[in-house]
Image (spheres, rainbow, N blue to C red):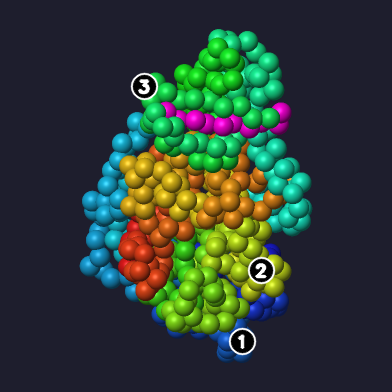
Amino acid sequence: MPLESNARIVSELARRGYNAEREAVTLLAGAQNPVVAMEAAVDHAPDDALRITSDHVRAAIENTPGNATDSLADDRDSGVTTDRSGGGVTDDRSGGVADDTAPGPTPASGPPATDDPSGTERGSPVETKGSKNESGSASKHVRDPELRQLEIGNDMTGNSTGTGEYMDFVRTFRDRYARLSKVLRGRVTHRPAEAIADMPGGSDAAMIGLVNDVRSTKSGHWLIELEDTTGTFPALVMKDKGLADVVDEILMDECVAVEGTLADDAGILFADALHFPDVPRTHRPGAADRHVQAALISDVHVGSDEFMLDAWNRFTDWLHTPEADPVEYVLIAGDMVEGVGVYPNQDEELDIVDIYEQYETFAEHLKDVPGDTEIVMIPGNHDAVRLAEPQPGFNEELRGIMDVHDARIVSNPATVTVEGVDVLMYHGVSLDEVIAELPEEKASYDEPHKAMYQLLKKRHVAPQFGGHTRVAPEDRDYLVIENVPDVFHTGHVHKLGWGKYHNVLAVNSGCWQAQTDFQKSVNIQPDSGFAPILDLDTLEMTVRKFA
């Protein structure tokens, strides 16, 4: 098959089990006969090499005999190429994965199975260290870039309009109200606050608004003040109404609907029901029309002296094995590097103290991923972008450093549609706030997916303003979950957890950093070295452990 572009060269090398330096690809593409040059470079590379370098290419071209060149050139003209890997990756390119690793699924070592509101049990297996195929044979999966489909939605990079003025915040919250109230209007017959104030006492009424205040009364009831574009109105939830389980999930500034009856003096609404925007139970997720997989990872933290390089190398080595051929996408949910000055005395835990060197090192590690893999990255709170969400996807200088395999670098959050599957990627800073505010049985670090369920229920990735999560004012509230995703992927809390909520798969993917002194001080035991592997055709998931 003729090599017509750099992408084709990368694809052909990946099919043989090799990654390639960008300069090496350029040299191959510029050779008089790229096929000859590529085959010679592969032959010249050491047996244990995973990457074709520019030195390999130069040496191979210089040492290629003329008659061998002519022979291979004839093959190219006839449309034939020589594949010395036998159609897959040979054992010597398995990246050193031990033969005595677990050959198949083992009982899940992640968080325990939980009761799922959608009735779906979490039964995904955890496999250790990335074993070979049971037969030891090459994969039959065809990695054809032409079959791939990847679209980015809700990316606000380059579209920031906020100046920090008062009216910017007003526009943000008006947009939030407009879009979330639209979701709720199909469930209640609502009236604006000013219209409810003019209704006679004893009337049935419903209001949709942002939570302006929520507090307990001396009698043990709950008073909720709702605000819409016309004003505010109070709702009282009586303790004997059976709504306590709902009230304790309410966060400030989120959008809810309250139905009930007005008091005789029409000054307050006695609540009979309370509704969140929520994900409909009837949601039907999309699916790829072929067997293809995505690796969901986050929190790499290159630059930390606790970055787990050995585990990362085992992961990237496994990606070069036949078993990993279907993994054509890698989605990284933030915190590529450890950063600088993120928490007190962080400098004492840094292996790399320069932020640009951290990103350069991360880019080098990213090169160990097969060159024809599609990579999508969003920033996190340790990355060199603004802390306030939504976070734009890095400046041009950092993009240039991380421009490996033509990675897509987008904002936090963003929606990535991968072969018909909508994946909402969000780093997850607000999970800290949700876990702190809600009862432990509804949100905890040990079961981070439950906190993610709450964000899906609220249809907003960071509903509470003015707390731990910093929110930037924009003309549009990019943090609203307007369209229901099929997969919700987060990181940040360094804990592994997954489950389904109303047919939406929620995955918090752990980290690649061992426990730091700071984490010890706040009693965080991270789940490190895990890689959730998602089947995009079935939305089934296998969690692999490389630590």
**Which class describes the residues within 10 Å of circle 1: few (<14), some (14-19), or many (20+)?**
some
- The tag earlier along the polypeptide, 1 or 2, is 1
Q: Is residue 252 visible?
A: yes
Q: Amino acid at mark 2?
A: Arg
Residue 29 in the image, given as x and y percentages of width and height: 68, 73
Percent of width and height locating residue 324: 41, 59
Report the span colored magenta: 221-230
Magenta stretch secondary structure, dominant: strand
Q: State how far apart marks 3 and 2 are (Cα).
A: 56 Å
User: Element at badge 2?
Assistant: helix
| In magenta stretch: residue 226 | yes
Residue 439, by quadrant, is: top left
Give the mark, 1 or 3, whose residue is nearer the N terminus: 1
* Label 1 element class: helix
Task: Give the Cα separation between the discs numbered 1 and 3.
Answer: 80 Å
Image check: 148 left or right of 90?
right
Q: Residue at x 58, y 14 (%)?
A: 265
Q: Residues within 10 Å of mark 2 (few under 14, many from 20)?
A: some
Q: Is residue 148 left or right of residue 344?
A: right
Q: Quadrant of the C terminus?
A: bottom left
Residue 399: assigned label: 2
Please state the total of marks drawn on the protein image: 3
Does residue 504 appear anywhere in the picture?
no
Nearer-N-terminus badge (3/2): 3
Position of the N terminus, as image quadrant, is bottom right
Q: Which residue is mark 1?
A: 58
Amino acid tagged 3: Asp
State how far apart marks 1 and 2 are (Cα).
28 Å
For label 3, count other residues whose C-alpha is less than 10 Å away and answer few (under 14), some (14-19) or many (20+): few
Which residue is located at x 47 percent, y 19 percent?
272
* Residue position for label 3: 240
| Residue type indicated by callout 1 | Arg
